[in-house]
Image (cartoon, helix red, strand yellow):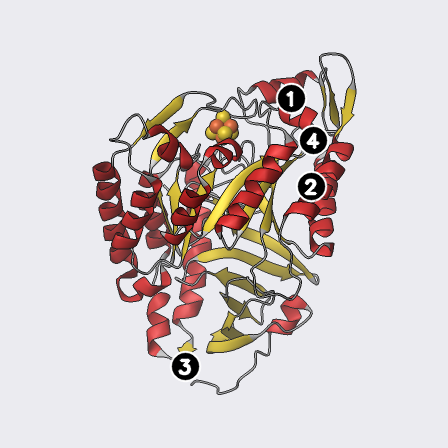
């Protein structure tokens, strides 16, 4: 029988405070109270989530399409992560059991399935205040895996989709890049541009998948990512090769197939922004690209050169200002922490400390990113990417040899730098996210097969 009350009886126990929320369903799990709440962003700009909480100490966060994002369990007053979605790929990492899920993928998928099954079983036994919300959770674990598996056809694990979540459709519009970053597994291979017809075909297939899994809730699929290492390559290269589609055509095509889009994301690069016509950037924004990501990595010129992205800081400042002035409501700058460990020696034998480089990057960001000064203009965002060494890359080799690069002694040193930059950004009222990882090498993860 549905118990009628308005505020969660469990939520404060999980957060220590009560974020704004509404009760969606209540019931019992193992004889104790279980609640499903829609928790609104407790910070401005943060999207709402569903939280399933049980009196037994389980807390599950689910996205707006009802997909599990993380599972935590409270033991001895501490919340332990059992399972967590990886930000970039739709894969899961964890559970925090003593096995390597990379080495034992089958066992990993079984564990994943049983954790997910249990969640959906608890939810299906709850009494819902509104029937149409219940539909969202009529998922089963195998469907969750199948959905990610099907979406995986549109991008692969070497492609980085920042802020990938269950409301996002990510479709690759070109492959490769011209960069020569020392931390990249596939540097400098050149770009394979897809034609407009090829992109159209991919979008049609993506639409079918979305309809298959979210037919009754298409309005929830409001985010899209035009996946390319730099969307503006298309703009510059089509001057000579007209079969290459213009980024504006690509963005419009996304909206034709997905009229539900509210947030449309794409990557650009410092050099391609600086070389673009300002009026064109404005038109690109007006065509619907309203979340723009730019890889800044560091504001320390020697570090930039060392990691294989020799772009001067003044050029990065110029590119961000150009994007802001073109009207992009949220410029998202990605910065890397940890790529040179404690520091590195230049060819001339001079030591460059990573803390000094980080402090320069902090000053750069504080000066150039738009802050929350109580104005109605949205804040820009800094996405902090923790460096994780990738096999067969030049930078990993330099870390391993420990000659030119002085590696961190343990993960705590990396964490300290991430926390430093995160707290500096918050103090400066700049929106910041620190969960983004540049690669997943060596981490426990489960493939959505
Ligand atoms: S990491 Fe560098 S080389 Fe690799 S895709 Fe990105 S920009 Fe290109």
Q: Is the residue 339 above or below the residue 22 in the image?
A: above
State the residue position of label 2: 364
Lower position in the chain sequence, tag 2 or tag 3: 3
The quadrant the C terminus occupies is top left
State the residue position of label 1: 306
State the residue position of label 3: 129
The one of 205 and 2 positioned closer to us in this rendering: 205
The one of 4 and 125 positioned closer to us in this rendering: 4
For mark 1, does the 10 Å Cα neighbourhood hold few (<14), some (14 to 19), or many (20 or more) residues? some
- Label 1 element class: helix
Q: Is mark 1 within 8 Å of ligand 1?
A: no
- Marks 3 and 1 sit apart, C-alpha to C-alpha, by 57 Å
**Labels 2 & 3 near each other (Cβ < 8 A):** no
Say whether residue 19 is left or right of residue 428. Answer: left
**Position in image of residue 386 (x %, y %):** 62, 38
Say whether residue 264 is left or right of residue 445. Answer: left
Mark 4 or 3: in front is: 4
The one of 387 and 314 positioned closer to us in this rendering: 314
- Label 2 element class: helix
- Label 3 element class: loop
Q: Is mark 3 within 8 Å of ligand 1?
A: no
- Marks 2 and 4 sit apart, C-alpha to C-alpha, by 9 Å
**Labels 3 & 1 near each other (Cβ < 8 A):** no
Say whether residue 320 is left or right of residue 233. Answer: right
Say whether residue 317 is left or right of residue 34. Answer: right
Tell me the tag on residue 300.
Answer: 4
Tell me the tag on residue 59.
Answer: none
For mark 4, does the 10 Å Cα neighbourhood hold few (<14), some (14 to 19), or many (20 or more) residues? many
- Marks 2 and 3 sit apart, C-alpha to C-alpha, by 49 Å
Residue at left offset 44%, top offset 68%: 122
- Marks 1 and 4 sit apart, C-alpha to C-alpha, by 10 Å
């Amino acid at each position: 029988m549905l118990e009628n009350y308005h505020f969660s009886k469990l939520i404060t126990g999980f957060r220590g405070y009560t974020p704004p929320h509404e009760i969606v369903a209540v019931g019992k799990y193992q004889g104790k109270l279980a609640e499903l709440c829609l928790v609104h962003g407790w910070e401005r700009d943060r999207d709402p989530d569903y939280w399933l909480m049980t009196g037994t100490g389980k807390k599950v966060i689910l996205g707006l399409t009802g997909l599990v994002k993380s599972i935590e369990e409270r033991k001895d007053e501490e919340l332990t992560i059992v399972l967590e979605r990886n930000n970039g790929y739709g894969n899961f990492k964890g559970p925090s059991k003593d096995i390597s899920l990379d080495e034992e993928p089958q066992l990993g998928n079984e564990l994943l399935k049983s954790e997910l099954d249990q969640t959906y079983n608890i939810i299906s036994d709850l009494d819902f205040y509104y029937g149409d919300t219940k539909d969202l959770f009529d998922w089963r674990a195998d469907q969750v895996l199948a959905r990610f598996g099907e979406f995986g056809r549109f991008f692969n694990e070497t492609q980085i989709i920042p802020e990938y979540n269950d409301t996002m459709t990510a479709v690759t519009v070109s492959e490769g890049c011209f960069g020569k970053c020392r931390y990249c597994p596939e540097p400098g291979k050149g770009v394979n541009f897809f034609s407009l017809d090829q992109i159209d075909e991919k979008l049609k297939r993506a639409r079918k998948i979305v309809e298959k899994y979210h037919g009754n809730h298409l309005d929830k699929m409001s985010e899209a990512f035009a996946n390319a290492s730099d969307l503006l390559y298309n703009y510059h290269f089509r001057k000579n090769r007209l079969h290459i589609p213009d980024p504006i055509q690509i963005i419009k095509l996304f909206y034709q197939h997905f009229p539900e889009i509210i947030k449309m994301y794409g990557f650009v690069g410092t050099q391609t922004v600086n070389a673009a016509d300002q009026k064109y950037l404005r038109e690109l924004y007006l065509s619907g690209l309203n979340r723009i990501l730019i890889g800044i990595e560091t504001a320390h010129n020697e570090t930039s050169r060392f990691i294989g992205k020799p772009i001067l800081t003044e050029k990065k400042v110029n590119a961000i200002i150009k994007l802001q002035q073109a009207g992009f409501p949220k410029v998202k700058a990605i910065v890397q922490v940890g790529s040179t460990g404690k520091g590195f020696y230049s060819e001339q034998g001079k030591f460059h400390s990573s803390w000094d480089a980080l402090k320069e990057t902090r000053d750069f960001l504080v000066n150039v990113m738009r802050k929350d000064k109580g104005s109605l203009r949205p804040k820009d965002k800094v996405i902090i990417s923790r460096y994780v060494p990738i096999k067969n890359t030049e930078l990993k080799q330099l870390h391993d040899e420990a000659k030119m690069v002085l590696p961190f002694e343990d993960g705590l040193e990396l964490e300290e730098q991430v926390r430093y930059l995160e707290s500096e950004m918050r103090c400066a009222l700049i929106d910041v996210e620190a969960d983004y990882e540049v690669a997943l090498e060596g981490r426990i993860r489960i493939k959505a097969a």
